[in-house]
Amino acid sequence: MEDVHRRAIQSNFVSLVEQTDLDLMVSTLYEKGVFSDQMIEKYKDTSVDVRNRKRQLYRDVMLRGPDAFRHLTDALQEAGYWNLARDLDPDSSLHTRRPQSQPSSREENSFISIRIKDLKRTDAETQKNCVLDEGRTPMPVPNEKEEMENMEMELNDNIPHFDVIKSTKFFDSDSETDIKLYRTRGRQRGVLLAFSYINFQHGMEDERLGADVDAKKLKYLFIELGFKVCSYLNLTKEKTKETLKLLNQVLAGAECVFIVVSSHGYSRDNVSDVDFRCHDGKLMSIYEFLEYFNNEQLPALIGIPKVFIFQLCRGWKELQMPLGASSSTYSDGVAGGGAGAALPPGPSGPPGPPAARPPPLPAPLTPLAALRPPRPRPPPPARLYSDILIAHSTLPGYVSKRDVRHGSWYIQMLCSVFAQYAHARHVEELFTLVDMRLHEQYQVQTSAVERWGFNKHLYLHPGLYDT
């Protein structure tokens, strides 16, 4: 197996272990010839924890020759783990099967992700600089055994950990307010779609340092919440739109969907809308993005809660409410008018007598058509947008702060709150707690939430499933 493919597996090692079914992957890889009869016996040993057996499985795959990577990604797609196949190879389609008859060398090269290509180029440039600048040979690449021994330490260093508190009971409808609940009790609890734009072509924008930390935190958090995670990194605008058009297959059967968009943001003339920057520098508005999730585009998701999280600047103002500013200085109304403004005086002089009312008209004769029983009304047309909750990291016109080491302020607070309270509170309450904690921690940034026909409570019930 080529080094770039081994690195891709190592980078996604935790997700492979957490999200895949052991028996399904063993049988599929056995059918493809990756493992022999004798080799799969250790994966059947029930005296060993299932998690440890899966860890051993993916370690062994990295030692199974030049075709093993292709067979692994094919097996993941056949088993329905499209997000994992995409994470291993972001440049490939989630829905197109690759023929196995292609030569392995050309096939494997097509699996190299943009990120892995950059890493490989950077490593090569670093080694070249070591030779030219320092006049000595670079350090040798560790062999496979050394990489296996160091992999656990690397994973622990790179992957954030959240102690997600698990639910002990299912919540029912709120009897006091008659607010019903979205159903989230099955094993297909939900899907997280994470669109992260970190680097931009031709250096037209600064690299969003710390945004990769956000992506790792969100991925780990939602896996712990029981979600399938689909990560999309540095897509062009065209590739973003192509991906959105195929979501009906990725989201089939999901009980709820979370969608995160993280990039540079720019305010528009319509202050409620924002443009975000794609990898190729082209701008896409959040309203254009939201159109792909309306009831016409995704009829299968009518009635399914869709929660959007936009980690974007929405303008250039730094502070969202300077300390000591009076409310009159930052009034929402227009000077001299508004609902509380005095009405203009009426004409001078005493009021005259009230005008006489005209006599009532005679009642018309009842037509025969009115005596017939009324026809049933047609059902009302379905709304174009419903079951949508939109969370913004900041207010219209203001920036959204990001720490280059720990990630954006908002995502830090969101991960902390969801891990601590998702077992006991519905999602709208969670976003309320996120803003409270954002204020306690940083004071100057205010988040915002919009409801588009989101008329039920959404509990995530982490760790709890219907039998």
Image: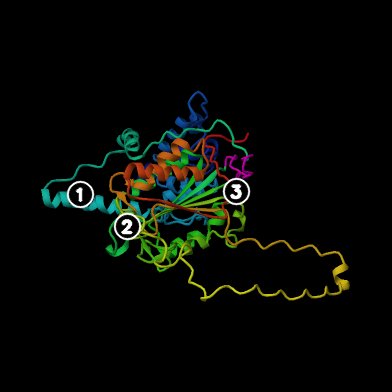
Q: Which residue lies under the disc numbered 3? A: 253
Q: Nearer the viewer, mark 3 or mark 1?
A: 3
Type of secondary structure dominating the magenta stretch? loop
Circles 3, 1 touching at the beta carbon (< 8 Å): no
- Asked if residue 178 is among those painted magenta in the image, a careful observer would answer yes
Residue on which the image places disc 1: 127
Q: Amino acid at mark 1?
A: Gln
Quadrant showing the C terminus = top right
Marks 3 and 2: CB-CB under 8 Å? no
Quadrant in which the N terminus appears: top left
Amino acid type indicated by mark 2 = Asn
The residue positioned 83% from the left and 74% from the top of the image is: 364
Mark 2–mark 1 CB contact (< 8 Å): no
The mark nearer the N terminus, 3 or 2, is 2
Name the mark on residue 199.
2
Observer-nearest of 79 and 135: 79
Say which label, 3 or 1, has the lower sequence index.
1
Q: Between marks 3 and 2, how big is the CA–CA gap?
A: 33 Å
Relative height, residue 446 to residue 220 (above, below): below
Q: Is residue 177 magenta?
A: yes
* Residue 185 placement: quadrant: top right
Above or below residue 244? Residue 123 is: above
Q: CA distance from mark 3 to mark 1?
A: 48 Å
- Image quadrant where residue 320 sits: bottom left
What x and y, as percent, mark residue 359? 77, 75
SS at circle 3: loop
Residue range in magenta is 174-187
**Is 246 drawn above or below residue 145 in the view shown?**
below
Q: Is residue 12 visible?
A: no
Identify residue type, mark 3: Gly
Q: Secondary structure at mark 1?
A: helix
